[in-house]
Image (cartoon, grey):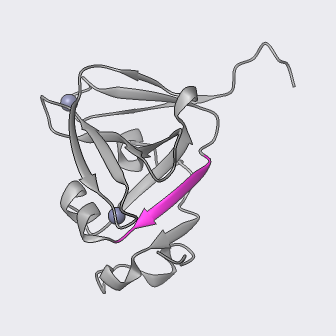
Amino acid sequence: MNADVPPPARTASCACGGLSVTCPGEPMLVALCHCRECQKRTGGPFGVAAFYPEAAVITEGASTTYRRTGDSGEEITFHFCPTCGSTVFWYPKVKPGTVAVALGAFADGSFPAPAKQVYTRHRHPWVPLDIAPEAPS
Ligand SMILES: [Zn+2]
Ligand SMILES: [Zn+2]
């Protein structure tokens, strides 16, 4: 390992490119969530988040925020593009110092697959069950 070579970075961005986040190295965790809030947020049957240390990522561009309280009782602050509306990243207070990045925003088919899934009780029946290991939600 050469210490002068930075770890590979991936950039996630909104549909118009105005809001982005660059994430070095591999995500700490990739998780798939079937909850109804994720369904509403993404417009799809589930959401997938890649978690990184907040201090390691670089965000660029203007964002509008939306806050909601998660099931944990802790607040989550979502950052979305004021122009195109894509949610790119969010800060779950329940995981301090961590930023969640919308997997779809990387638009990268080689991105690591989810290591767990939660809220399977809200899974749409046509979504495969073996998409990721189930974890308590
Ligand atoms: Zn945008
Ligand atoms: Zn969810």
Q: Can you tell which quarter of the image residue 64 is in? A: top left
Furthest-right residue in view? 1
Relative vertical location of residue 3 with respect to residue 20 in this rendering, above or below = above
With respect to residue 132, does 64 lie above or below?
A: above
Pick out the residue farthest to the left. Answer: 83
Residue 55 point in image, percent of width and height: 56, 27
Q: Residue at x 15, y 39 (%)?
A: 85
The dominant secondary structure in magenta is strand
Residue 36 in the image: above or below residue 93: below
The image shows a total of numbered marks equal to 0
**For the point 28% across and 26% down, which residue is it?**
19
Residue 37 location (% of width, % of height) = 24, 63
Q: Position of residue 39 (x, y in %)?
A: 24, 65
Residue at image position (14%, 34%) is 84
In the image shown, does 126 or 23 lie closer to the viewer?
23
Ligand 2 positioned in quadrant:
bottom left
Q: Nearer the viewer, residue 123 or 56?
A: 56
In the image, which residues are magenta? 28-34
The quadrant in which the N terminus is found is: top right
Q: Position of residue 135 (x, y in %)?
A: 55, 76
Q: Is residue 50 left or right of residue 76?
A: right
Q: Is 128 in the magenta?
A: no
